[in-house]
Amino acid sequence: MRHLSRTTLTVSAGMAAVLTLASCGGGGGGGGGGDGEIELTIATFGSMGYEALLEEYEEQNPGITIVQQHTGRSPAHHQNLFQKLGAGSGLSDIEAVEEGHMARARSASSRFHDLNEIGPEGLDDRWQEWKYTAGQDAEGRLIGYGTDMGPLAMCYRQDLFEEAGLPSDPEEVAPLFETWEAYFEAGDEFTSADIGSAWFDNGSQVFNAMNNQLEFGYYDAEDNLIVESNEDVRHNWDRVGEAIEGGQSAGLAAFSNEWENGFADSAFATKTCPAWMMGPIKEHSGDEHAGKWAISPTFPDGGGNWGGTYLTVPTQSEHPEEAAELAAWLTAPEQQIRAFVAEGPFPAQVEALDMEELLEHRDDYFATPDVGPLFSEAAKQIERAQYKGPSDGDLQDNVFGPAIQTIEQGLASPDEAWEQAVRGANELEN
């Protein structure tokens, strides 16, 4: 299996299960090679920026071979994760878990190792407090090392703003992004210019950003579903629905092929932009749009956090201590800064926010290249993250997102789609 080290296996949802089960270690975790080496498997998704880091770790640790099993999209990754968690076999030594799915992982915490017991000592103060706490179960067992967080900014196409007669300089654009009302009003003005591009990519992404600013979204602190009684969530829904009916949405489902192509096709002018979104913007917009995207640090109603991931070690792992060592190394400030530079996931480690390597980082793809200090300042303003309940990720991916799409497709009014979403949420809980 040595030839598989330093190779990222990018797999579809279906092939992820096959490849995980077919790894050298057999049904669970990584196995030992014939020459006595240890093989560690790590299952990731999205743009985590670990490729070069995993190669370096192998070079620093002779005898350890790492196989990364990568799924492009979060829903497929987490479906595979929880299916195999329930089956009791087939998981990697390290499994990445997105924040929206951590509550579900915490509810099955006995199937993950306590990293305080098997991992390196002295890491308690490494992370933002809210990030560290979300990695613990009810008994205080630490089941996840935090990787990144998603401080919010707003990305926009300067050239499309100019074509529509809107200001494009970041200082002049800031008032358009000061509040959600200002944002949607600017969207009406942009849409009326009729330049052939929509104001935003899809309503679900805007709705998610708005909801992540709330202290409580789909659940309260006791894990009760509060969708129907949460007036703030309903207000956000109505405002996004109104904007969709006003023609502001391109209606491109997030991370679909059409959405990816939409960047290159200039299908929309603004993008809710947690730090990790920089990677997809660059990848899908292409070189021909370099210098056209700008990032505004002003985000409607004060910013917040959207996204972030944890590295867990399932009890299925055959090499849990070695896996914990690797996970701890990957989530150290130095490594997470390098992951940010590579792909955009912003480090959730306290020390990282003031490190020179971060504050001096520029990305010349953007018209506003000083992305390191921009997102560092946005991150420092995050005092808490929204409480996530047991099915938060599934509600976002499989209930509310598809319901918003029915509005964009002209199949339902905002009220009808809301009723559909509420029914779906209750059915998911029951």
Image (spheres, rainbow, N blue to C red):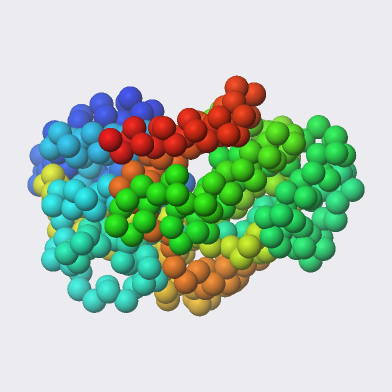
Image quarter in which the N terminus is found:
top left
Residue drawn 13% across the image and 66% down it: 117
Residue drawn 71% across the image and 62% down it: 178
| Relative image position of residue 14 (x, y in whole percent) | 33, 25
| Relative image position of residue 294 (x, y in whole percent) | 72, 55
Q: Is residue 179 left or right of residue 397?
A: right
Please tell me whether residue 377 is drawn above or below residue 176 in the rendered image. below
As rendered, which of 62 and 416 lies closer to the eye? 416
Residue drawn 19% across the image and 66% down it: 140
Q: Is residue 93 left or right of residue 406?
A: left
Quadrant in the rendering for residue 176: bottom right
As rendered, which of 211 and 366 lies closer to the eye? 211
Residue projecting furthest to the right: 165
Q: Is residue 377 something one can see in this rendering?
A: yes
Residue projecting furthest to the top: 411
Q: Is residue 252 something one can see in this rendering?
A: no
Quadrant in the rendering for residue 322: bottom left
Please tell me whether residue 124 is drawn above or below residue 177 in the rendered image. below
Quadrant in the rendering for residue 251: top right
| Relative image position of residue 335 (x, y in whole percent) | 40, 63
As rendered, which of 112 and 63 lies closer to the eye? 112
Residue projecting furthest to the front: 229
| Relative image position of residue 392 (x, y in whole percent) | 38, 46
Residue drawn 20% across the image and 31% down it: 21
Image quarter in which the C terminus is found:
top left
